[in-house]
Amino acid sequence: MSFKLSDNGKTKFRSNHYNTFGLNFGLPENGGTCPGATCGKGGCLDVRDGLKRQTCYMAKITAIYKNVGVVLEENTALVKGKTLEEIKDVCRKTIQVFIQKSKGEDLYFRLHYSGDFFSEDYTKAWAEIIKEFPTVTFWVYTRSHEYVKHLLGINNLSVYLSCDPVNFETMLKVYEENKDKNPRLALAWLGNTAPDNEKYRWVKCPEITGKVKNTNKEGACSKCRLCVDNFKIRLKNIQFLNH
């Protein structure tokens, strides 16, 4: 079995490019896979003033597109409560299917358009499988700070530490402790007001600001690639405005 892949409008590099997958979002105690999800003011699970749903964009998507939630549930069931070897088998088959469907071209793969690293075994499984496929370029955003150590130093993986006013100090500590030896590690801020732009030099996601558009043929990520591999020395810190 493999994860059901998605032809995501933002991440695809060409038409019918199934290059990402999702798991249940939200806290584990609520059935999600995001142990690092934040519930306080400005957090990803915060309910913003004037709105009834959570800030996390998946809350909106699953409310509008009911079948998305079904897919997330099915994907999650493949790895939740499984052994390391069972999880590795799912991850490996997923990437094999991706490469086959991509016909060996445009091998750019985003982990988790929904959900996150929910356990040490799940994180270790992906770390090992990513290394098995050096021709594939992976990128991921994560709030699971306790598992980031397993993802560092992998040449074909870019890791963004997702942060907001609730968890910024925690994620900043992880970043500062590891950034010098890991050029493929950076911060990703969620919110309209990011801290100390002079110091962190945030780059606003050009898709959200409208500078780079998604089209039927390709998503904005394929044109921008700042989060993927568009850097000379190290990844840039990205700011995602609330949307």
Image: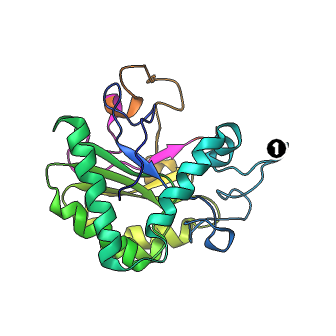
Please, is residue 215 above or below residue 94 in the view?
Answer: above
Please, is residue 52 above or below residue 9 in the view?
Answer: below
Taking the image as drawn, is residue 234 in sight? no
Q: For the point 53% across and 32% down, which residue is it?
A: 208
Q: Position of residue 167 (x, y in %)?
A: 59, 67
**Which is the main secondary structure of the residues drawn in magenta?**
loop
Name of the residue lying farthest toward the right:
50
Asked where in the image residue 19 lies, by quadrant, the reply is top left
Q: Please tell me which residue lies in front, 122 or 205.
A: 122
- Based on the picture, tell me whether residue 227 belongs to the magenta stretch: yes
Q: For the point 44% across and 65% down, which residue is it?
A: 78
Taking the image as drawn, is residue 84 in sight? yes
Q: For the point 31% across and 61% down, which residue is it?
A: 91
Q: Position of residue 240 (x, y in %)?
A: 54, 43
Near mark 1 (Cα within 10 A), the count class, few <14, some 14-19 or many ≥20, is few
Q: Position of residue 124 (x, y in %)?
A: 32, 74
Left or right placement of residue 68 versus residue 9 in this view: right
Asked where in the image residue 123 lies, by quadrant, the reply is bottom left
What colouring does the structure picture have? rainbow
Asked where in the image residue 176 lies, by quadrant, the reply is bottom left
What span is colored magenta in the figure? 223-240
Q: Position of residue 110 (x, y in %)?
A: 36, 48
Q: For the point 78% across and 49% down, which residue is it?
A: 48
Residue underneath mark 1: 51
- Based on the picture, tell me whether residue 21 belongs to the magenta stretch: no
Q: Amino acid at mark 1?
A: Leu
Please, is residue 140 above or below residue 79 in the view?
Answer: above
Secondary-structure class at tag 1:
loop
Quadrant position of the C terminus in the picture = top right
